[in-house]
Amino acid sequence: MRVITRAADGTRRTITGGSRGPTLAGMSPPWSAGVVRLRRVVNVVNLATPVGLVVAKAGRAELARGPHGLLLAKGFRPPLRAAAMTIGDVVLLRRDDDWLARHPRLLDHEARHAFQYACWLGPLGFFPAYLACAGWSLWRTGDPALRNAFERRADLVDGNYVRGLDDPRLHLVKRRLRNPVRRRTGAAGSSRRLR
């Protein structure tokens, strides 16, 4: 397990409980202009960014250029569970600029998702894989983000899912992972799973 958190002074601290190799969470901004340009081209070719633009237009959002080569769709009207959602290089925002100014690392998190779209061949690969990971996380922890590989690699702290290592929801994850399935023995000696 790998947890990345930020100290009060803004420094990053990584705690690793297993070796999985390099992840996108290790990719910290600023990215080089060439890497961002390549990601943008790949996301246009794999149709992720065009799909994001169609969704932004359907949600009556205003487009603006953002950091890391992102397009910000501000004022997105349909309700989202999270403060933002990324499709390709388009970040659908339902929060205002003041909230975004108080959470500047959110766009770093969303830029990592844009890289994930490029790596997972756009919406055809990313959507099913993301939904499978969210389902797994929901089943294991009761939360669709805490054990979701895509959210963890995009950095849970930057995405405002957890506040840091002292967040009580992380203790829930540890407790559920220790005892994921309880068994109860019936009169005949058979066992069955309980939730």
Image (spheres, rainbow, N blue to C red):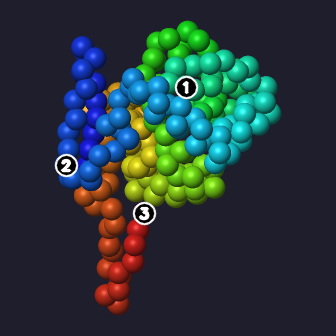
Instruction: Identify residue type, mark 3.
Output: Arg
Label 1 sits on a secondary structure element that is helix
Label 3 sits on a secondary structure element that is loop
Badge 1: residue crowd in 10 Å (few <14, some 14–19, many ≥20): some
Badge 2: residue crowd in 10 Å (few <14, some 14–19, many ≥20): few
Q: Is residue 17 or residue 135 the one in the foreground?
A: 17
Q: Quadrant of residue 190?
A: bottom left
Q: Quadrant of residue 172?
A: top left
Residue under circle 2? 17
Residue under circle 1? 69
Give coordinates of residue 6: x percent, y percent.
28, 24
Q: CA distance from mark 1 to mark 2?
A: 33 Å
Label 2 sits on a secondary structure element that is loop
Contact, mark 3 vs mark 1 (Cβ under 8 Å): no
Q: Earlier in the sequence, mark 1 or mark 2?
A: 2
Q: Is residue 46 visible?
A: yes
Instruction: Identify residue type, mark 2.
Output: Gly
